[in-house]
Amino acid sequence: MSTTVITGIGELVTNDPAREGLLGLVADAAVVVEGTRIAWVGPTADAPAADVRVDAGGRAIIPGFVDSHSHLVFAGDRSAEFEARMTGEPYTAGGIRTTVAATRAASDEQLLSHVGRLVAEMRSQGTTTVEIKSGYGLSVLDEARSLAVAAQFTDETTFLGAHVVPAGTTPEDYVDLVTGPMLAAAAPHARWIDVFCEDGAFDVDQARAILTAGSDSGLRGRLHANQLTYGGGVRLACELGLVAVDHCTYLSDLDVESLSDSGTIATLLPGVEFSTRQPYPDARRLLDAGVRIALASDCNPGSCFTSSMALCLALAVREMRMTPAEALHAATAMGAAALARDDVGVVAPGKAADLVLLDAPSYLHLAYRPGVPLVAGVWQGGRPVLGTPTLG
C-alpha cells in the first residue's frame, strides 16, 4: 500500500486528546498517510520514509471540517426572501414550502447535479465530512428519492420528513404519514431521523412520536429545536438521550442544565443568525456550564445559504464569544461527535486521512482573516482532492 509523508507542517492541529491542549498542537510536524488512514504523526525530524513526500512549506494543517447539519437536496432559489429579511421582514418557517414545490418538480438528475456542486463547493473550503438531510420533498416518493440522492455523496443521511406540515393535510394525518409509509420508504436510505420541533412546525409530543418511530426502525435521532423561540425541544432531546440537538438559540436555565447533565451536544449554526438577523446563541454560557458544542453550516436555500465552515467559525468567535481554538474544535472533533463518529475530525494514527492545508502559518488565521480563501489543499481519505502537492 502506497504511503505519503507530509513534512514541514508549521503548525498541526490534531485534536488528539492524548496530546496537550484542546487542539493537540504539534509544531514543525509531519504526518504519514497509508492508504485511507493516518499511520504516524510527530516531529518532521523523526518522520519515517515514505513512497511520496509532500512539503507543507511551514503552513498549517488542520483536520477536515465535519459539517454535521446541512440541507443540500433542493431546487429553486429564495434570494428574494433573503432580500426581504434584510429590509425588515422577520424569518418564519413558511418559506420551506416554496422550496418543496421546486424540489418536487425537479428531476433526479437535476437534484444530483445540484448536490454535487454544493458538496464540491464545501470540499474546496475544507469540509471533508458532511451530513445531508431530506425535508424538501414531504411526500413518500420525494423524501425517499431525496435521501437516495444524498446517499450518493455521504453516509451521514438524515430523514427530515417532519420539516413542516405540507399544504392540504392536517398535522395529525401528516404525523401518521411520516411515522408510517414515509418512514418505511426513507429508512433504507438514512442513518438518522430529525424533526423541526418549533412553533409553526411540530410540537414536543409530535416530535417524540416521530423520533420513537424512527428509533424503532433503526434510525438514530437528532432534533432542530429552540431556533425561533423558547420551547421544550432541547429538553426533549436530552430526555431521549439524543447525540445532538441543533440551533439552541433560545435557552432557559433549565435547558442549559439539561444539556450539561445529559451530555447531548448543542450544535450551533451561526450562519443562520447571520442570514436572518436573529440573536446569536450564547456559546460562552453553554461552554461555561460544561455543555459540549459543535458548529455546522446549516447550508440551505432559505435561512442560511452558505457552505463555508470557515465563515461559521469566524462568526462563532466574533459573535458568540468562543475562542478560536474552541471554534475550530467545535467545527471538527465536535462535529464528528455530533455524528457519533470517532474516525474523523482528529489527526491521529488509525483515523481517516482527512486533512486541510491552510495557506497560513496557523489555524488562527481562519478567524483572523474572515472571508479569505485560505484552503490550499485537501486530502480526503488519503487522496488529494484539492491543490497540487509540492514534492520534495
Image (cartoon, helix red, strand yellow):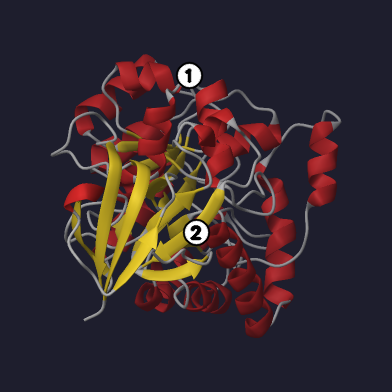
Residue nearest the observer in this picture, 162 or 134: 134
Closer to the chain start, of discs 2 and 1, is 1
Residue nearest the observer in this picture, 389 or 307: 389
Q: Is residue 27 visible?
A: yes
* Circle 1 residue: 321
Residue nearest the observer in this picture, 367 or 194: 367
Position of residue 170 measured from the top left corner of the image (x, y, whole percent): 59, 56
Q: Which mark is residue 384?
A: none
Relative height, residue 282 to residue 170 (above, below): above
Crowd tier of the residue under label 1, counting other residues whose Cα lies within 10 Å: few below 14, some 14–19, many 20 or above: some
Q: Is residue 187 left or right of residue 160?
A: left
Three-letter amino acid code at the position of disc 2: Gly
Quadrant location, the C terminus: bottom left
> Residue 204 falls in which quadrant of the image?
top left
Q: Is residue 175 visible?
A: no
Relative height, residue 338 to residue 2 (above, below): above
Q: Secondary structure at mark 1?
A: loop
Relative height, residue 196 to residue 262 (above, below): below
Q: Secondary structure at mark 2?
A: strand
* Circle 2 residue: 377
> Residue 376 falls in which quadrant of the image?
bottom right
Three-letter amino acid code at the position of disc 1: Arg
> Residue 341 falls in which quadrant of the image?
bottom left
Q: Is residue 132 left or right of residue 290?
A: right
Q: CA distance from mark 2 to mark 1?
A: 29 Å
